[in-house]
Amino acid sequence: MDRLQALKVFVAVAEAEGFARGARAAGISPPSATRAINTLEQTLGARLFTRSTRRVRLTDAGRAYLEDVREILTQLQAADDAASGAANTPVGQLRLTCPQEFGRIHVAPVLTDFLDAHPQVRADVLMVDRLVNLLEEGFDIAVRIGHLPSSDLTAIRIGQVRQVVCGSLAYFAERGLPQTPDDLTAHRLVAIGPASPLNEWRFGADRSQAVRVTPQLTVSSLAAAIDIARRGWGLCRVLSYQVGADLASGTLDTVLEAYEPAPLPIHLVHVEGRRAAARVRAFIDFATPRLREIEALHYGQSAGPLR
């Protein structure tokens, strides 16, 4: 096996955290993958993985090597694409990550339309509510909700969301409207996430006003919390896009708007330059106007150009 193929096998095994799964991803047999990694480690004079009966893990040297190898393979692919003309044709695998509910509600419909328009592209989407490192974890594009730190990545703003307290009209008819955040202590609240003895909801443009709340119900499912609020049982606190359809239809309504924190921007983030393959550029060009047209991603925002 040549050195280039061995590097591809190394990346596949590292991402799969196993020789069998990595071998399948690389299209070779597990013994061949094992031999390739052993040869690579002997050539480097360094151990790249620690092995156990269940899985393999990267060593510190392996993690550093993985980042460099991914960069090398990406640049090599860009060079191949430029030479073959594929640099202008969307082909290959597009890897995208986004928050779970945002992906379900907004990314999935846009992505399937994009794949219909570009049948030579395959997509792998990780919908997860954590910050994914694009370079270290091998993703092309990420949806980021919130203010962005300084980085070498390119960010395109597609909208904004608010953190809102919402409930049904039936609930408000029965229990009244909270007029200030402190009034929430007299209301039935549904919290999302693991139960916490210290439960604070923060208000104000700078989030400086903290209100200690005691939810009567805590659920791990965002969808369940919203459904409970729809049925008039209590109030929940979510991001506005997560209840966009409910707010538009009047199933739910928001309260305490004057006390809300400042809106959070939404961006598409990607690697720029030659490392941005044609499929990445094509998806950005396709998705940006589609996402900017979604009313729920501009809830409470005056009309104006996005930058």
Image: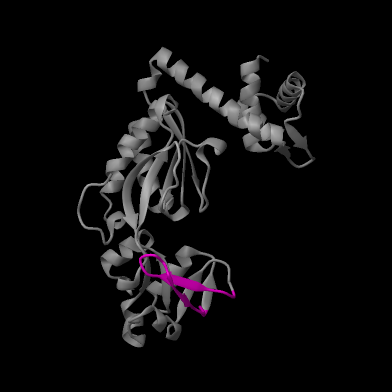
Tell me if 23 is positioned left or right of 223 in this view.
right
Horizontal and vertical percent for residue 232? 39, 78
Q: Which residues are magenta?
A: 197-216
Magenta part mainly helix, strand or loop? loop
What residue is drawn where x is 32% and y is 66%?
246
Asked where in the image residue 178 lies, by quadrant, the reply is bottom left
Instruction: Judge whether residue 281 is colored magenta.
Output: no
Instruction: Judge whether residue 208 is colored magenta.
Output: yes
Vertically, is 266 above or below 67?
Answer: below
Horizontal and vertical percent for residue 230? 38, 72
Asked where in the image residue 66 lies, by quadrant, the reply is top right
What residue is drawn where x is 31% and y is 62%?
245
State the quadrant of the C terminus.
top left
- For the question of whether residue 82 can be seen, the reply is yes
Which residue is more in the foreground, 182 or 285?
182
Horizontal and vertical percent for residue 161? 35, 58
Which residue is more in the foreground, 10 or 53?
10
The residue positioned farthest toward the right in the image shown: 53
What residue is drawn where x is 63% and y is 23%?
7
